[in-house]
Image: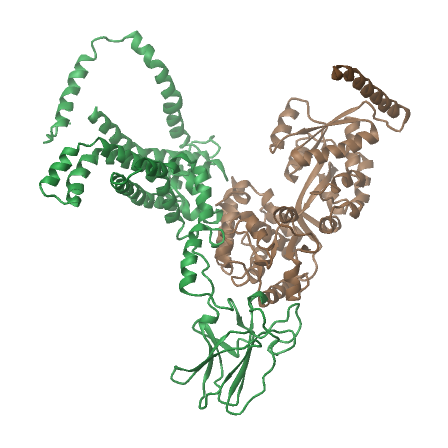
Chain colours: A brown, B green
Amino acid sequence: MNSSRLGPVLSVAVLVSLLAACGGSSTTSSKPLAGKKVEVAAVWSKDEQKNFEAVLKGFSDKTGATATFTSTGDQIGTVLGSRIASNSPPDVAVLPQPGLLKDLATKGSLKELDSDTASLVSQNYAAVWKDLGTVNGKFYGVFFKAANKSTVWYNVSAFKQAGVQPPTSMADLAQVFATLSASGVKPVSVGGADGWTLTDWFENAYLNIAGRDNYVKLTNHTIKWTDQTVKDTLKALSQVLQDKYVYGGLSGALQTDFPTSVANIAGNPPKAAIVYEGDFVEGTLKDTSHLTPGTDFNFFPFPGATGPSNSVMGGGDVAVRLTDNAAGVELIKYLASPEAAQIWAAKGGFASANKKVDPSVYPDPVAKASAQALANAQNFVFDMSDQAPAAFGGTKGSGEWADLQTWLKNPTNIDAATTQLEKDAAAAYGS
Amino acid sequence: MSTVVPAVAPPVVEEERPSRAARAPAPRFNRAAIGFLAPAAIFVGVFIIYPVIATVIRSLFNRTGETFVGFDNYVKVFTDSRTLHAIQNNIIWLLVFPVAVTGFGVLFAVLLERVPYRLVVRTILFTPMAVSLLASGVIWRIMYQQTPETGAMNAVIASVANAITHPGHYQGARPSQPDLTQPVGDGYQLAQTVSPGDVVHMGFIGFPVSEIPAGAQDAKDPSGEAGRIVGVVWRDFIPGGGGQVGQVEPGKKGLPDMTVQLVDGKGSVAAQTQSDTAGDFSFASGGGPYHVVLPAQNFHPPFGGVQWLGSSLVTPAIILAAIWVWVGFATVTIGAGLATMSRDLLEAARVDGATEWQVFRRVTIPLLSPLLIVVFITLVINVLKIFDLVYTIAPGSVIPDANVIALQLYLVAFTGLGDFGIGSAIAVFLFLLVIPIMAANIRRFQGEG
């Protein structure tokens, strides 16, 4: 039989090529970690896992160490907790929540990063990213992947029809809404049936109007939701989210889920000109319509209080070290380098806060601009509702979600909204 | 019970029971009987009795289960506005749903007696029971969408509504100079009155260029003519921006086919015309002064859809979906009862000269009543624990309006605060509500036995 004769031939060929590969690695002595092993744990699965494994392969090719990936699923906190308890933590973990970094650091489960990595981060990243990876003065984490949730998406032809330019301040935004409305398109679609779209609207406006310090305070509930800054923010929002400007009216917005709100700006002619949500809207639009990023739809940064904003709200995945494995030290240093980020950036669905990343690797101009806004932001804060207790910031039909939905029914009724928000926040944070 | 009942059957049962009880104690305990009972007893103990007791105990502790709080959780349940609203909704469900489903069940079962292919029809009616409630919920949520393009319910209404009142050419249009052109009814009129020789300018914005009929030309500023009232209606917005509000300029389209009326001082229409392809119109009427009116028919919006899932209609909408699911069950059960019913009684009634309605009302219903009560009680129990349809059909923003007890239990205990204390208290409350109905049901079964 042919196959039985082919078998040995093939295995010899494989053996030869393997030997050749080994020979190659042993001759180039620039691979200091040859034979070393490092384990990385993160929440990623499917495509994201595949893309991250490509990054790890880049590390292996460079250093000779074998990096293996463990997907923890959504419950990374629980998985890490039990592995730390059993004294066999992964060498490196990539944490999706800033709260987890703080928790693990205070418990003493994390290793401080070396000075080489620290100086690399200082060179490659805006200062805010190093601060975010620092707990009690010690630097623990490198932000490898980040998400920009300060992106306002618009239909390019609707803007052309109306002859408007992307606005940079809240007053500009109100003016753009008025002009879009005159041109015969509803200015904005809001996915108000999903509470989290409203919390994101609020957080962006609050960050720009009240500033980063207040944002952090409100996130920790050290100032109350009845604070004047909250009222000012809701007032500013009520001037743009008016019944006449929102597709379907305000009551219609409360019936519109997030995917529908995105689809509303994709038609020809579109039902609405603008939809606000994070950088993932690009993927949603590309998947569900035949629109081209840049020419058919684009984004502008969430407008600042009085002029262009230098603040970005979003999310990030931070790489931390849990063991003293030398390969782990090198891996984190590698993740802080532009070459690691570029591997994934080229594959799409990824943004890096690393300023040294070559922007031309992003698959399209919109992804590139969104990532650059992230890397150049002077302020970066995490999604406030993601950091709040789930009872307040993450539950359908209660807490902040329900309160902002009630507020959207009648946006000028600000005092009632802030009172209810404070009541629910007090209950959730207090317990 | 010692009450004397004139009916024949119950007293027989009543008398039998004590005699059975008297015979029972003879073998004090029977190993075989215990052996046979044990598996069921263990099952009931582990999966029913223990959880009930544990829930009652848990309901007396706080959120974390560490501190004994007495009846605090119950106080919270009955003072929390969201839970109270859920209880209120459950009462609405209880009043409407069992009666409606039993009623439809009787209706369909009786009517099905008279049609051929009743097995096919009955199967079709029963199909929703075979679909998972989650899937039913998703289907109904889509059917209830507000835009007629996606929501089947509104699409049906829209096709009728739009046939009765034709949508106008210029939906959503509004004057570019609200101080000069003002609303009158659902249309618009020029604020100032006009007389022959005057020129009328009415600019409009707020509608897409695609609403202007093909062949429209750029608007021109008309020049006045002695003895005539002339004017122009135009889209006061240049695509791409630019231009000045209120000016007839190149790039601004005239609005053809706009109905224009001259209304005299008494409010009656003196003349009516249509604008031409450049939006110009002209009246030869003498006299005046007149109001220039663009009546509502120009602007009439298409039917926008009923907001089925808004806060006011959401509970009736979900009840309707639940009726759709359950009516097959009632029809099939009652239909089975009808099939076994003796025809002789019906025939006898007919021979005695009863009308069909009298036969139905005086013979069929009384004979069916034991079965109707079983169906009704089953529905009452199901309505008390209704959950899936509400959770899947109601959008997040109206969950507080559509809430029911079982859903509130889930929201309190398994999401948000994760308060198992209050959740258990709600569960105990729900349990207490079901017990009397269950007791009545068991009593009935025993009575029948």
Res A234 visible: yes
Q: What is the x, y in percent for residue A425?
A: 52, 46
Image-based side of B23 in relation to A289, left or right: left
Q: Residue at x 40, y 32 (%)?
A: B60
Res B408 visible: no
Q: What is the x, y in percent for residue A240?
A: 58, 61
Image-based side of B421 in relation to B32, left or right: right
Residue B303, above or below B385: below
Q: Residue at x 15, y 44 (%)?
A: B358
Residue A38, above or below B387: above
Q: Residue furthest bottom?
A: B226
Position of the N terminus of chain A by quadrant = top right
Q: What is the x, y in percent for residue A382?
A: 65, 45
Q: What is the x, y in percent for residue B126?
A: 35, 36
Q: Residue at x 30, y 8 (%)?
A: B32
Residue B30, above or below B160: above
Towards the viewer: B370 or A118: B370
Residue B60, above or below A410: above
Q: How many numbered marks have been drawn onto this rendered protein structure? A: 0
Q: Quadrant of residue B349?
A: top left
Q: Residue at x 15, y 16 (%)?
A: B19
Towards the viewer: A130 or B377: B377
